[in-house]
Image (cartoon, coloured by chain):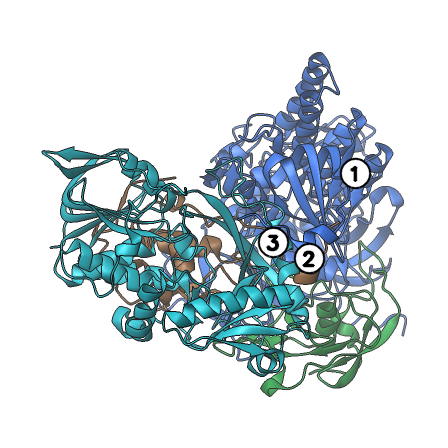
Chain colours: A green, B brown, C cyan, D blue
């Protein structure tokens, strides 16, 4: 399901009211060890959504999968480890070239693994 | 504020419900059943329920579940929804890194 | 026993941890207790607004016997006793220093505590780092008390309430007491804004407000009122389990079971509040505490603060509480002035207070806490 | 206990910045308040936690209702741009990525910026923090793929990412209806719209737009389950009884990848509560709100609330509330005279009164009348299925039978809105001074087919019909806001109000114009008997053009 490049069907190529939605330049970043692409400046969550990534984290108590819920930085369901910092709200944190994004398990990386920093 | 509230008032027994396992507070993963149980343990205010269970005390600070918890608690206590005082609002209104809060200008 | 009327054997004024836990220990003895809490919530004062320390080190030697007794006899079994996990962790207390002056303060406290039989000692920077590798390299030493620890004050307070209520203690919240009334030479009536309650004995455990309540029968205890602030972070990966403090009171606190860090601190202006009622935080406390924490824990700079809160403490003129029978008003007892360190001591204090009120011999001598000990300095 | 802190001795805190007015929130009410105050001479700063100003306006791509003075027929994001221009012209400072994290004694605030916090004071403060979305819990509601309606708008309208491919919408208020339509515009499929209430909560015209696109409405239905293990793969809904309990055996399953929740808004009033304002729980205003006077002033003198934070309403009324609070703050601080203020307030309250009318007015929330102000029956079909039935539609004054080309206005509810009246240069359409009245078509006027009325109707309820197009066929001109835009000569199907396929249709004209503002006018040719039935055009699947 998760493509390394974007599936155009998940993006709106042209919008009947908004026309073409302006985006930054296409950049690469790391998601769970793979190199993927997104547009610079768009929220990480949106870039992941366009890649088909739905699960951002697994909860601490019940290990439930969570993804985007409010998309405006309120609910904090979409938090991930970004550049080594857990609990980063990916819906309001912009994509930049070379950032490292990891799925969050509880408040840590998978199996207590390292939080990768640039 | 400061309504006389006799904590020995009979609110009936805890009766299990089919959806007790449903998560209400997403951040702290508190279920409907836990909230209802807490009411029967004497937690009759939103503040007490929060302090006892942590619901509404997670990352989002109750922005998502405040209404839901209040609704469940009011039903369980047998009081009108609007009679329950919401939790205190506290700064910082948005979570902020210590290094930012420490850096005053 | 499950009273619903306006009378009881004992009325406790104040539904904080002292009131709730004393009610519990009295109820266990079969005493019919009524607790009147002025606010809408149980444990609304310092009980739910503190840093959760269950510590002995750093305390006034006069307090040590009570808190040591509680830590030895009550805290380890509190979960089973109350049926709620109060998150008690006896993992020690580091009191940190960064300068020779700090070390002097710590040594002084340590010597006094040792004299009281407390297992506490000074340790060097290397040993500090072994206990807590996350601390700044600027820490040059600490006092270390391995039997100190921390617990969840919100849960502990409400757990006492829950258990006491289960034993039939009658709690009424939102019932603000405005005064006491003597009848035929003994304290008898408790007058609230709405009602009159009656009991043979009355224990006033209402924090600073105790002062006004006691004054209604001619007793004045020198208590002040100071606004203190705490803060809590989001949950972080597990780092350490000790209770922490510093020689200079830059901050104090611990990492909770939940993963969040609960810290308290001061901005230096406590006691000078213009408004002595409200609970609006001032704008200085959280930033000040954050700087205090980061001095010692630079690695926490990215931890997000999700909430700060404010509470009033009730410092007494000599910094230790009043836990006393008030003989001049027969039937009256007071437990107040815990001076901002009333949480860890609460179980031990309450157990002894219950004995005092029940006219039993107390497990620990409470004479240091008499209400009439405050004399002129010269 | 006071001790000299070495830390504070080392720090240098700048002189406290003080403004005549601090506004929290750069949405419609905040910007309007700031502009009003700055135009009165006040030194004003607006803080907003987001990196874009405008609040929710920039996600609103539909045309607004109301009258000219309420920015009617202008799309939300254009209104946002206009408000920003006005604020800038008035000299308002707008600071973005700046979250007000606390209000303290003496009207001091702290603002969190990228790397630091700042302390400031305002002689007055207007809190215009807007609202947050309500949520409804159900089994599996925490699965990835269950999102808020605001999230859907953020994804598709700000970032150009589809919220999902197949979507179940929960909630039939205006947000649920508008967002569902936007989802269709983004190229998603809305498989159903469910609401536990027995009738549609939002405007009938919004519902009708969806119905004719084929979106089915499930009123008196609630979601019972989001299915899936690590993401939503389906949803189950059930009919509910009069106590909103699911009725056994009525469960229906949908294959969906996204469930979108649009069950109302709550005032985001925590900052006001923190500042010590007296609050109450008022269900009519949407939840926990400050007690305010008619100017929005709270129980703390000099602290005001404007917009959704003091009661959920539309953006249009939020803008006026902002103006009202701004003018009041200016009076408080002596920037305008009492006479000046009173004159302004008079005009604002007239504007506000104009909006707070009709069957969706704040006062009549939840109580849908049985008849319109004209005494006509409210369509039950519209309230329960989302469309007017073919026989009902003819009852309303905008629906006339006339020789040759003429507008058909399928407007059946009293909504404060009148752009159609201004759209026709030949005075063919009349609403009157009371803008909630249903528009009427003047039988005497000539229709030139310019289509301005079609494009100006925010509810997309106006069609141009010519039953005499030729011997056998009629023409229907309809508003069309989808891509790809059909081309003259294309053929496809005509759909009825309920979304059912009626017949084949040929596209005989496609008009686009800046004046239409992205509402394209599609004229289709259909058999004569379909003239009063065909209301939407469905292209043939997989158009093989441009290959």
Tell me which chain the residue with mark 3 is part of. Answer: C
Query: Which secondary structure, mark 1?
Result: helix
* Disc marking residue C286: 3
Q: Circle 2 sits in a helix, a strand or a loop, which is it?
A: helix
Indicate left or right for C334 with D108 as reference. Answer: left
Q: CA distance from mark 2 to mark 1?
A: 35 Å
Other residues around mark 2 within 10 Å, as few (<14) / some (14–19) / many (≥20): many
Number of the label disc, if any, that sits on residue B102:
2
Distance, label 1 to label 3, CA atoms, is 36 Å
Q: Nearer the viewer, residue D292 or D190?
A: D292
Asked if the residues shown at circle 2 and circle 1 are in contact, with their CB atoms under 8 angstroms apart, the answer is: no
On the same chain: label 1 and label 3? no
In the image as oriented, which residue stretches furthest toward the left? C184
Quarter of the rendering occupied by the C terminus of chain D: bottom right
Q: Give whichever of C78, D459 is nearer the camera.
A: C78
Q: Position of residue C290 (x, y in %)?
A: 63, 59
> On the same chain: label 3 and label 2?
no
Going by the image, does D410 lie left or right of C279? right
Tell me where residue D223 appears, x and y as whole percent: 47, 64
User: What residue would you read off at disc 1?
Assistant: D83
Q: What is the CA distance from the residue labelled 3 to the residue labelled 2?
A: 8 Å
Q: Residue at x 47, y 70 (%)?
A: C110
Residues packed near mark 3 inside 10 Å, few (<14), some (14 to 19) or many (20 plus): many
Which of the two discs, 1 and 3, sits closer to the camera? 3
Specify the quadrant of the image occupied by residue D230. Answer: bottom right
Q: Position of residue C245 (x, y in %)?
A: 53, 66
């Amino acid at each position: 399901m998760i493509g390394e490049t974007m599936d155009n069907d998940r993006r709106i190529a042209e919008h009947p009211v908004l026309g073409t939605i302006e985006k930054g330049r296409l950049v690469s970043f790391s998601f769970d060890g793979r190199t993927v692409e997104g547009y610079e400046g768009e929220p990480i969550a949106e870039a992941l959504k366009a890649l088909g990534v739905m699960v951002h984290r697994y909860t601490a108590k019940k290990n439930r999968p969570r993804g985007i819920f409010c998309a405006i930085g309120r609910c904090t369901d979409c938090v991930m480890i970004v550049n080594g910092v857990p609990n980063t709200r990916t819906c309001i944190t912009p994509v930049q070239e070379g950032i490292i994004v990891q799925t969050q398990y509880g408040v840590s990386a998978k199996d207590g693994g390292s939080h990768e920093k640039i | 504020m400061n309504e006389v509230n006799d904590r020995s008032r009979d609110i009936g027994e805890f009766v299990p419900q089919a959806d007790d396992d449903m998560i209400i507070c997403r951040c702290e993963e508190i279920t409907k059943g836990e909230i209802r149980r807490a009411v029967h343990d004497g937690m009759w205010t939103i503040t007490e329920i929060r302090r006892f269970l942590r619901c509404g005390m997670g990352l989002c600070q109750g922005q998502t579940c405040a209404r839901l918890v209040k609704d469940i608690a009011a039903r369980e206590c047998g009081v009108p929804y609007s009679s329950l005082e919401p939790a205190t609002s506290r700064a910082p209104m948005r979570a902020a890194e210590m290094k930012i809060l420490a850096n005053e200008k | 026993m499950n009273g619903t009327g306006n009378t009881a054997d004992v009325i406790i004024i104040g539904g904080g941890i002292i009131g709730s836990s004393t009610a519990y220990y009295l109820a266990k003895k079969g005493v019919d207790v009524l607790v009147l809490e002025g606010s809408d919530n149980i444990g609304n004062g310092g009980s739910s607004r503190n840093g959760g320390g269950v510590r002995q080190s750093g305390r006034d030697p006069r307090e040590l016997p009570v808190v040591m007794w509680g830590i030895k006899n009550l805290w380890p079994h509190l979960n089973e006793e109350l049926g709620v996990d109060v998150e008690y962790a006896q993992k020690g207390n580091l009191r940190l220093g960064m300068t020779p002056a700090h070390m002097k303060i710590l040594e002084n406290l340590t010597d006094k505590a040792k004299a009281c039989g407390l297992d506490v000692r000074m340790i060097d920077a290397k040993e500090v780092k072994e206990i807590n590798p996350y601390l700044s390299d600027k820490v040059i030493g600490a006092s270390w008390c391995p039997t100190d620890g921390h617990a969840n004050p919100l849960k502990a307070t409400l757990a006492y309430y829950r258990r006491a209520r289960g034993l039939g203690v009658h709690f009424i919240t939102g019932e603000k007491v405005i005064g006491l009334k003597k009848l035929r030479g003994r304290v008898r009536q408790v007058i609230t804004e709405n009602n009159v309650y009656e009991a043979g004995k009355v224990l006033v455990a209402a924090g600073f407000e105790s002062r006004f309540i006691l004054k209604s029968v001619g007793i004045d205890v020198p208590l002040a009122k100071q606004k203190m602030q705490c803060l809590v972070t989001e949950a972080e990966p597990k780092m350490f389990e000790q209770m922490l403090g510093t020689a200079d009171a830059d901050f104090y606190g611990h990492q909770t079971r939940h993963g969040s860090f609960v810290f308290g601190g001061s901005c230096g202006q406590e006691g000078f509040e213009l408004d002595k009622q409200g609970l609006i935080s001032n704008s200085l406390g959280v930033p000040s505490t954050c700087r205090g924490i980061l001095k010692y824990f630079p690695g926490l700079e990215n931890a997000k603060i999700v909430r700060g809160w404010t509470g009033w403490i009730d410092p007494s003129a000599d910094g230790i509480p009043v836990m006393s029978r008030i003989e001049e008003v027969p039937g009256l007892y007071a437990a107040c002035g815990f001076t901002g360190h009333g949480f860890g001591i609460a179980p031990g204090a309450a157990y002894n207070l219950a004995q005092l009120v029940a006219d039993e011999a107390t497990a620990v001598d409470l004479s240091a806490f008499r209400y009439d000990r405050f004399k002129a300095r010269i | 206990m006071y001790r000299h802190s070495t830390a504070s001795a080392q720090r240098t805190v700048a002189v406290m910045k003080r403004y005549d007015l601090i506004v929290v929130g750069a949405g419609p009410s905040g910007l309007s308040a700031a502009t009003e105050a700055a135009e009165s001479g006040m030194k004003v700063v607006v803080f907003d936690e987001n990196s874009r100003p405008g609040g929710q306006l920039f996600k609103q791509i539909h045309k607004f209702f109301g009258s000219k003075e309420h920015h009617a027929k202008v799309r939300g994001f254009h209104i946002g741009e206009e408000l920003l221009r006005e604020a800038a012209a008035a000299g308002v400072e707008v600071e973005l990525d700046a979250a007000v994290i606390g209000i303290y004694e003496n009207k001091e605030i702290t603002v969190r910026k990228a790397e630091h916090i700042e302390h400031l004071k305002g002689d007055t403060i207007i809190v215009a923090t807007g609202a947050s979305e309500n949520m409804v819990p159900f089994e599996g509601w925490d699965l990835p793929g269950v999102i808020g309606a605001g999230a859907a708008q953020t994804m598709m309208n700000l970032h150009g990412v589809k919220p999902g491919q197949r979507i179940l919408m929960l909630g039939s208020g205006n947000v649920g209806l508008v967002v569902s339509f936007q989802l269709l515009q983004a190229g998603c499929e809305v498989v159903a719209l469910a609401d536990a209430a027995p009738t549609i909560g939002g405007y009938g015209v919004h519902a009708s737009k969806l119905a004719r696109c084929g979106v089915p409405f499930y009123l008196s239905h609630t979601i019972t389950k989001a299915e899936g293990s690590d993401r939503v793969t389906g949803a189950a809904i059930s009919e509910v009884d009069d106590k909103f309990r699911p009725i056994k055996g009525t469960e229906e399953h949908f294959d969906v990848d996204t469930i979108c929740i649009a069950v109302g808004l709550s005032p985001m009033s925590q900052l006001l509560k923190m500042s010590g304002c007296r609050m109450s729980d008022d269900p009519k205003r949407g939840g926990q709100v400050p007690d305010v006077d008619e100017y929005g002033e709270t129980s703390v003198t000099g602290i005001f609330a404007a917009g959704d934070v003091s009661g959920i309403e539309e953006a249009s009324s939020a803008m006026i509330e902002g103006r009202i609070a701004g003018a009041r703050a200016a009076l408080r601080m002596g920037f305008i005279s009492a006479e000046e203020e009173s004159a302004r307030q008079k005009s604002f309250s007239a504007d506000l009164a104009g909006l707070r009318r009709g069957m969706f007015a704040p006062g009549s929330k939840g109580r849908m009348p049985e008849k319109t102000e004209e005494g006509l029956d409210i369509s039950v079909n519209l309230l329960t299925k989302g469309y007017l039935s073919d026989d009902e539609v003819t009852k309303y004054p905008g629906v006339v039978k006339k020789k040759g080309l003429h507008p058909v206005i399928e407007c059946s509810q009293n909504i404060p809105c009148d752009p159609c009246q201004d759209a026709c240069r030949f005075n063919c359409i009349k609403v009157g001074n009371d803008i909630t009245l249903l528009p009427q078509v003047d039988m005497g006027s000539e229709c030139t087919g310019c289509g301005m009325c079609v494009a100006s109707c925010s509810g997309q309820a106006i069609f141009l019909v010519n039953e005499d197009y030729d011997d056998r066929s009629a023409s229907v001109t309809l508003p069309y806001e989808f891509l790809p835009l059909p081309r003259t000569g294309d053929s496809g199907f005509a759909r009825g109000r309920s979304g059912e396929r009626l017949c084949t249709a040929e596209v005989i004209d496609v008009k686009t114009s800046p004046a239409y503002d992205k509402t394209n006018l599609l004229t289709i040719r259909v058999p004569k008997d379909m003239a009063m039935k065909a209301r939407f055009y469905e292209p043939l699947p997989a158009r093989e053009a441009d290959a």
